[in-house]
Image (spheres, helix red, strand yellow):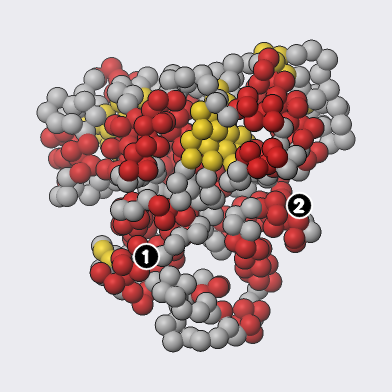
Amino acid sequence: MISILLVEDSPSQARLHHAYLQPMDVDVVIAETGAEAREALSEKKFDLMLLDLRLPDIHGLELLNAPSLDCPPTIVLTGEGSLRLAVDAMQAGAMDFQIKPVSADKLRDSVKRALERFESLPQPVPVAEADTAVNIEEQKPAPASDRQGPSGFLGESPVMRNVFALIEAAAPSTASVFVTGESGTGKELCARAIHNAGPRRNGPFIALNCAAIPRELMESEIFGHRKGSFTGAIENREGAASMADGGTLFLDELCEMDLDLQSKLLRFIQTGSYRRVGDSTGRDTDIRFVCATNREPMEEVKAGRFREDLYYRLYVVPINMPPLRARGSDIRLLAERFLRDFAKIENKSFKSFSPDAMKCIQSYSWPGNVRELENVIRTTVVLNDGEEVSLDALPPQLRGGPITADSVAGEGHSQGATAVDTTKIFLRPLEEIEMIAITKVIDHFDGNVTKAARTLDISTSTIYRKRENWIAKGLMKDPDSS
């Protein structure tokens, strides 16, 4: 049975949260003070901690920052809704930050996602092809492709402090936000931060990846459809517009959307009304729009691939997520955090990097940004062990050396390897060869799945479905976590 430590000084709140968790069949221990929490943590190993910050004797973050305590994965529950506090909590090690009052469904979903991240519960079964791009936070746990990385949203560099300030300024507004930045910089984390710091925090956050859905299904995914409205519509279906009512709709990779559908999206944004496919009557909804792209939106407008009127409707509050190479000290902060997290997940002894290894990490350009850094650290932890990560343990591409067949396959690195033996690449199961090939093409196009799909002559939904399958089987790390 899953054991949870609930640290809450209000007896009524503690009883309420305890009742919310009962359907999950968990064992809940309640501590009303920081001292009681310390005692409980010293006597028993918990799978998860739910932590209030305003305790009678200490501030809750002191528990997370205490070096003598081995705190389990933690979800912060607090009535304080400042973005700065959320960032402080994430930097101290919290996996999630929920503003009270929190609904039963939202609390249970947050708990389940946190446990899944540390493999305390079975990973979710891959969903149907048309659903792989939709993350319905209020309805079900986020699929693997949409889940955050274990370190959350971290940063202390000047450029990230500027991003945090923009998020804090934009969050209370109803204005549309357009997030830009290279692949792997954390655009969805930015969108979630805007949602969680704003007045819609207790409403749904719906993420729709516009590049992951076939063109012919996109309208149905956004607006829903009636049974029988087209071939394959065997039942009524609610779309993202309905699911996001009262909350936030995040449109990722928006510039990949078909021009015809862009006009319908513009009309929806202007009027707040939409029709399901096959319906004759409209529906009203109340939605905050946040969108993102790894392209330059105005260049897409000039090229005729993105409607100018839609651009000006959505480009109200622009936020640019900086590349990792521009974030200075954040590289060390993130690398050390990833190392601690993955060492715990993989049951390894790593505690630090050697000076040479850290110098190498900080001097690398990180074209794949935070996502690439996270993947590199996890690979290093999986393939090695010890208390300190040495320079030789890092992948050869970081050290300026050649990429061997073994390093491509993710099975290890050799400092002295000088050539690629293609035989080693092909002497493996066909599924792994396919995974390597598709991943390399995506990397070649800087994470643009649509361009990779066109080059490989397959649909984007096929790539997303295959990646979900590889992640579920443990063949690869989730490339969309950051």
Q: Farthest front residue?
A: 302
Viewed as shown, does residue 180 lie left or right of 445? left
Residue under the image location 75 percent in, 61 percent down? 456
Viewed as shown, does residue 141 lie left or right of 218? left
| Badge 2 element | loop
Crowd rating for badge 2 (residues with CA inside 10 Å; few <14, some 14–19, many 20+): some
Residue under the image location 30 percent in, 66 percent down? 358
Residue 474: in sight, yes or no?
yes
Q: Of callouts 2 and 1, which one flags the residue occurring earlier in the amino acid sequence?
A: 1
Residue 48: in sight, yes or no?
no
| Badge 1 element | helix
**Residue 78: % across, % down:** 30, 26
Camera-nearest residue between 317 and 475? 317
Viewed as shown, does residue 452 lie left or right of 144? right
Residue under the image location 53 percent in, 54 percent down? 478
Three-letter code for the amino acid on which mark 2 is drawn: Ser
Three-letter code for the amino acid on which mark 1 is drawn: Ser
Label 2 close to label 1 by CB (< 8 Å)? no
Q: Nearer the viewer, mark 2 or mark 1?
A: 1
The quadrant the N terminus occupies is: top left
Camera-nearest residue between 170 and 333? 170
Quadrant in which residue 227 is drawn: top right
The circle drawn on residue 459 is 2
Crowd rating for badge 1 (residues with CA inside 10 Å; few <14, some 14–19, many 20+): some
Q: Is residue 265 above or below residue 40?
A: above
Camera-nearest residue between 269 and 414? 269
Residue under the image location 67 percent in, 28 percent down? 310
Residues at marks 2 and 1, CA–CA distance in whole angstroms? 37 Å
**Residue 20: % across, % down:** 40, 25
The circle drawn on residue 293 is none
Q: Which residue is mark 1?
A: 363
**Residue 136: % across, % down:** 57, 33
